[in-house]
Image (tube, rainbow, N blue to C red):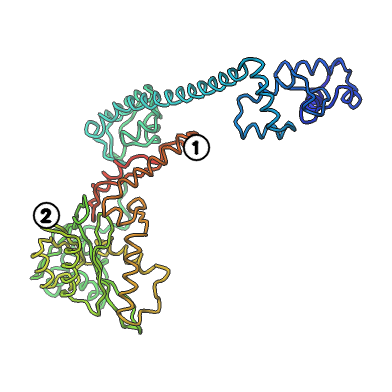
Amino acid sequence: MRYSKELKSSIITKMLPPNNQSLSQIQQETGVPEGTLKLWRKEIREKGFAAPAGEQQSEQWSTRDKFLIVVETSTLSEIELAEYCRKKGLYVEQVKSWQDNCMQANGGVAQELALSQRREKEVEKELRQVRKELQRKESALAETAALLVPQKKYPSDLGTKGRGSLTSTTNRDIIIKLVEQAVAGGASQQLACEEIGISVRTLQRWCKDGAPGADQRPSAKRPEPANKLTDVECKEILEIVNQPEFQSLPPSQIVPILADQGIYIASESTFYRVMRQAGEQNHRGRCKAPSKRPKSTHCATEPNRVWSWDITYLPGPARGLYFYLYLILDVFSRDIVGWEVWLEESAEHASQLIRRAVMAQNITRQEEPLVLHSDNGSPMKGASMLETLYQLGITPSRSRPRVSNDNPYSESIFRTCKYRPNYPIGGFVTINDARAWVKEFVHWYNFNHRHSGIKFLTPHQRHSGQGEEILEKRHQLYEAAKARHPERWTRQTRNWSLPNEVWLNPEKSQVEDRVESKPDAS
């Protein structure tokens, strides 16, 4: 007679600890013959499981069952052994005494067996990890090697200029072959396309009809806009702007004058465009022609190379009354190197603060002069301030006119200051109250504040040179955590490195270079 797997499994569970039911009891409950039950008990014992055959007291179990328990628990740790004993209805002390008896009776055979099983498991685990790491490195190496060919061709040989650029038929054919070669070498199609500078969708469109065709955009016939001015209307605009009554006026005045006369020809911007196309829109007059000023770009590679400073309002005891906070920040370390609160803005106060900050930092004449960046306020450009900078060998640097974000570091710290929870929104009663609060804020900012821009170091740690040692300890901590549980880390550990260069108002190309060189971090 065949019995279901569910019935057999439930009966075996009754035989095993902690149930330990006898064969006769199981026969009465289930109706399975005792011979069949003995056969099942023999099978599970041969598999290494203890079946005490109805002995509820573990000390009364047979020597064979005790030995099976010893073998089964030989590779378990203390915590795993405790869990096993709770599930089986045993005490840890009982199992350990059985282990000692087995070692004494067999001359250490059980211990050797346990050690060999443990070593075998460790070797198998190491082999699996080595195979996995080797496979990953082989795949990465193959993909890198396959991407070398597109990298050599991009961008000078193919002349690709980014999204939307025209690509000749010859270059399209070359790009398709390069991508196919990279994919055949083990690289993904997406990475190969990214190296060349095209999208996967573009490649699919080129390969849609088999052979890549020519770009149809240059030869496309586009209809003229329905609202385009006629040649007669353009000529009329030029004749009007050159009439004696309008010959010295700009279109911004000509158009309203014509509107007052009941005449409308075109909009003001259209006047400017037509004049520009005819070469008649040029700067004239005694005023200076508008010009674009370049950014004040500076790079700090260590503390006391580039400082940023500014003045901000602190609310006074009544509406309309203010105190003025002068604050100097080191761009490299974000450390506040000087501050003061005064009743008014003046170049004399600013020059005093600069002298005190230079003395506090023990700055002497350096190979590379200290750069002091500020906006275009009158205290920053005062004669006494400039004279102080020249005497100290400091290079002044200023923001572009009417550009609010050319002094970002000072603006950022002022926001941090005024958004502190204990900032007195109702204002300071006296200037001494303001100075006391700012003093407390500066100490907190320099020594306690974990700045996100410098990998959550304090500005003082970065300024004093302790940052590299602290970040290295963090890196070692994360590597140790990864070594304990490598399965929890799909990529590299968190990037705790800091760049050696800090830029003030970097150019666009410098920002792109920093993004490309940024290491991959999880």
Q: Position of residue 439 (x, y in %)?
A: 31, 70
For residue 21, above or below residue 423? above
Q: Residue at x 70, y 20 (%)?
A: 68
* Residue 261 appears left or right of 17: left
Q: Callout 2: 10 Å neighbours few (<14), some, many (20+)?
A: few
Query: Image quadrant of residue 144?
Result: top left
Q: Nearer the viewer, residue 257 or 284?
A: 284
- Residue tagged by mark 1? 488
Query: Image quadrant of residue 109?
Result: top right
- Residue tagged by mark 2? 366
Q: CA distance from mark 2 to mark 1?
A: 49 Å
Q: Position of residue 21 (x, y in %)?
A: 84, 27
Q: Nearer the viewer, residue 37 or 258?
A: 37
* Amino acid at dot 2: Gln
* N-term-proximal mark, 2 vs 1: 2
* Residue 114 appears left or right of 218: right
Q: Furthest-front residue in view?
A: 104
* Amino acid at dot 1: Arg
Quarter of the image with the N terminus is top right
